[in-house]
Amino acid sequence: MSSPTLDSDNAVAVNATASPLRGGRAVGLVATLILGVLSYQLNASMISPALPDIARQLNENVGQVSQVSSLFFLAGAIGGVVLSRWSDFIGRKQALIVVLVLLAVGTILCIFAPSLPILLIGRALQGASSAAFQLSYVILSESMSAKVFGTTLGIITAVNGGVGGVDGWVGGLLSDAFGFRSIFVVIFIVGLVALLCVFLVVPKTSRPVSSGRMDWWGAAVLSIALICVTFFVSQGSSAGWSAPITLIYLVGTIVAFVAFWFVEKRRTTPLIATEHLKSRQVWPVIATTILTLSGVFAVINFTVVLLSQDSHSGYGLDAATSALLFLAPAALIGVFAAPISGWLAGRRGWIRILRVGLIASTAALVVISLLPHSQWVVFGMIALLGITYNGLVLTTINGLGVLLSPPDAPAALPGLNGAAFGIGASLGIGIVAPFAAQGTAGGYSTALWISVGITVLALLASLFIAPRKGQKL
């Protein structure tokens, strides 16, 4: 198989077997994929405001109900890796149908859940639908010309930040007016429409991309590793990084990843071959993703949120105003910045635009760290991150996950990279939480500068990313 190229007359992907889609067919495909990923994203963003209502209706405390979100994202990390790679064997369209069927079944369980355990099972099935993002990226790479691949990938990436921050607000309105189950009814309808469109619009894979059989042993061991690392981060943040339970999960993480390495060395068709994991096309991408999310995500979604609502050391804003000023702008700007970033990357180079975005994001974080008590300076820098982080960085890192994936496993790196997003976000918050939670000027400052340091490491990791021979990225 030949390596991916950026020839404008051909589809981007390694294994594209048909001419690139154009005109109405291309628009229909992008619209269908947006519906597919939106079905997952609404589950991530609309449920948070409804957690108190879920606790009341199911007679549970809010602490227990928090598993509704944590289990969802954990299942997403596992599902994104496993189902994406499985699509190399059964076809993209078939895999996307499986994903949306899992979403539908999980949503039905959530609508009619009589208890928290049933609701959690439904949320786990919904979480597995995160593979819709990775599958969409690969489908675009195999269906679009290089000229439009970057722009369309940016459109899908923009959905990953929610619907401009409006979806969470709508979720709160639905929960207040009709109860939490009404949110799942809306999501179920969107998912059904997406499933119908996939049947009608998404082109069927003519033949499997990978020969042999799916590596279920590798998938199982990697799933255990992802579970261990997730609980390691959560326990480290709550119980302390040196607590016995935290160290147990750390040991479990190390053992599972070592076991995964040896399992992959012995498989005929591994989840991802060890020689690829060692290459400059794979590990630097994963490392850059984890470090970027650890650095920037924690600032936008945690430290600044706490700072803005702190009446003693911060701005003393209520939750709604805080979200309006420091969460919504970056998400809304990202909706427009991501497609433009993809277009720009296709013309100026994916790796170059990634590094530019990381440099600019680091600069914005430095300004926030220097002037954390200047509310409008922080507001301006968060808005800038909507361009540099939500736009330039997230779009290019997703694109590189597709373009640098091994030719014999095109969906492997997108799946691993998707899991890295969740790991990075959790890790970043876990690292800075003990400092930001102090509620002091020094605590916030320390948390912010730690995030700056982590983002600098992300930039350094990106310097190791290299295209395969013959690629122009």
Image (cartoon, rainbow, N blue to C red):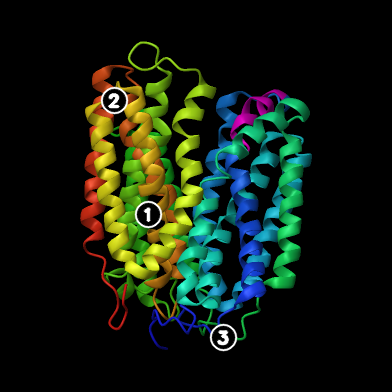
Q: Quadrant of the N terminus?
A: bottom left
Name the residue beneath numbered marker 3.
Answer: 19
Label 2 residue SS: loop
Name the residue beneath numbered marker 1.
Answer: 392
Counting from the top left corner in percent of width and height, residue 116 is at 68, 35
- Decide whether residue 434 is among the magenta residues: no
Q: Nearer the viewer, residue 31 or 237?
A: 31
Residue 376 picture quarter: top left
Residue density around tag 1, few if under 14, some if 14–19, many if 20 or more, within 10 Å = many
Counting from the top left corner in percent of width and height, residue 246 is at 35, 37
Instruction: Say what amino acid the circle numbered 3 marks.
Output: Ser
Residue 282 seen from this side = no
Relative vertical location of residue 10 with respect to residue 450 in this rendering, above or below: below
- Decide whether residue 53 is among the magenta residues: yes
- Residue 120, numbered circle: none
Give the magenta part as a residue range: 46-56
What distance separates the C-alpha of mark 3 from that of mark 2?
52 Å
**Dots 3 and 1: beta carbons under 8 Å?**
no
Residue 96 picture quarter: bottom right
